[in-house]
Amino acid sequence: MIHAMIIAILLFISGLCADSLNVHLVGYCNTPGFAYGVHVSGIYAYVVDYENGLRIIDVSVPSSPSEIGFYDTGDWALGVFVSDTLAYVADGFDGIRIINVTDPYAPFEGGFYDTGDMAYGVYVLGFYAYVADRDDGLRIINIADPSSPFRAGYCYLSGTSRGVYVSDTFAYVAAGNYGLRIINVSVQSSPFEVGFYDTGSFAWAVYVSGSYAYVADDDNGLRIIDVSDPSSPFEVGFYNTTGTSRDVYVSDSFAYVADAYCGLRVINVSNASSPFEVGFYDTEGAAYGVFIYGSRAYIADYNDGLYILDVSYFTSIEEDDAARPGKFSISAYPNPFNGNCRLMIDDCGLEINAIEIYDINGRRVVEIPAEAGSVIPNPDRESRISGVQLDSRFHGNDNMCVREVIWQPDETTTSGVYLVRATVGDKSVSKRVVYLK
């Protein structure tokens, strides 16, 4: 309590003479339209720029970010999620546009799906894209073949769906003036609502970490909802931000809130029942989107482009380590393949919980043992799991290593698209591979 009071006093004093606290500007890149959202992958920031589509910005030198490519999606680009070499754009009345960004200098559309109303937000997990489709609720799109996406299921919801986050078998939807809606998506063809919580204002976005859902609730600030029992969610804490909360990203014990005309606000949520502000940066425009990558916050600042802010004060990640593009990623070679496929998981120093392979129907066909997250003394081993030959090798030390897995399907494995997923805590990274028998 005393610590919180001291922080509050410092914030009041700093607010009289400064526009930042514990957060510093690193770089800035203007965009031609209105930056609505951002997703960062590797050395690129993908910004949805309203009527100006998807903008791709090279952030390898954070102090000098520059646009290197763009794609005009056709309508209002409002949300984006990047997975592997594809950017899934929630494009307003044009639904979901799937943009191939293998060559970020020359992105092109690889597929699309008209969701029915107005696509505001998108979250990709496995072979499915979950879309917050305003008045049409939650739409679940099968993206196993990105060139021919199709609807797998839908769930009509009260309110106007604006943001979505998927964790385990539940989708959490920020549904405007109807607050937080929780949908069971264990069977994608038959999703159903299991619980809801009225946040009080207008829920724009939601981020789930552990047993809590963090909701950006417009002029009600940040609301923290206990979702340990999805059928009976309840509020455990809140923080009324200075502006109007539009987006939220949670990392470690901090919630980073895009607070519109009051910029980025950093909230300590180590005690969910008593959150308090510990930092801020007042951007020049209106902070509509936020994404944390390493020790930096990337802000989609509506009429003022992309801001890159240093938030290392709140992170334990060293600068060089955070900037390393290959951190926690999966690569596959050859792909497609017809004999065996070499999977390289880079950086098992992150204590990977599991490595799994799924078929196009979402059925798990391979589960690699839990020790996959550790560096083992004997670097070579062979085992047979679920009809798949694995030859695993570890390279490196306790802080950085690469696990090499040779996947050799046996005669029972059919040709098709498969998804390789590695998981760390509640985060995962995936890679799509194609087996040609």
Image: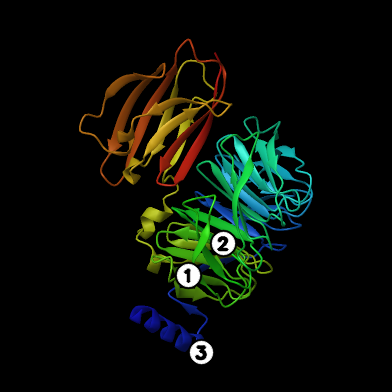
Closer to the camera in the image, 3 or 351: 3
| Above or below for 434 versus 326 | above
Task: Give the image's coloring scheme.
Answer: rainbow
Residue displayed at 40% across by 62% down: 253
Q: Give how far across and how far down residue 340 sits, in percent.
A: 45, 19
Which residue is denoted by mark 1 in the rendering?
266
Q: Give how far across and how far down residue 350 sits, in percent.
A: 34, 46
Which residue is denoted by mark 3 in the rendering?
16
Q: Are marks 3 and 1 in contact (CB under 8 Å)?
A: no
- Three-letter code, disc 2: Val
- Three-letter code, disc 1: Val
Closer to the camera in the image, 238 or 250: 238
Residue displayed at 60% across by 46% down: 183
Residue displayed at 48% across by 70% down: 266
Q: How many marks are shown on the rendered structure?
A: 3
- Chain-order first, disc 2 or disc 1: 2
Where disc 1 sits, the SS reads strand
Left or right of 390 on screen, residue 172: right
- Three-letter code, disc 3: Leu
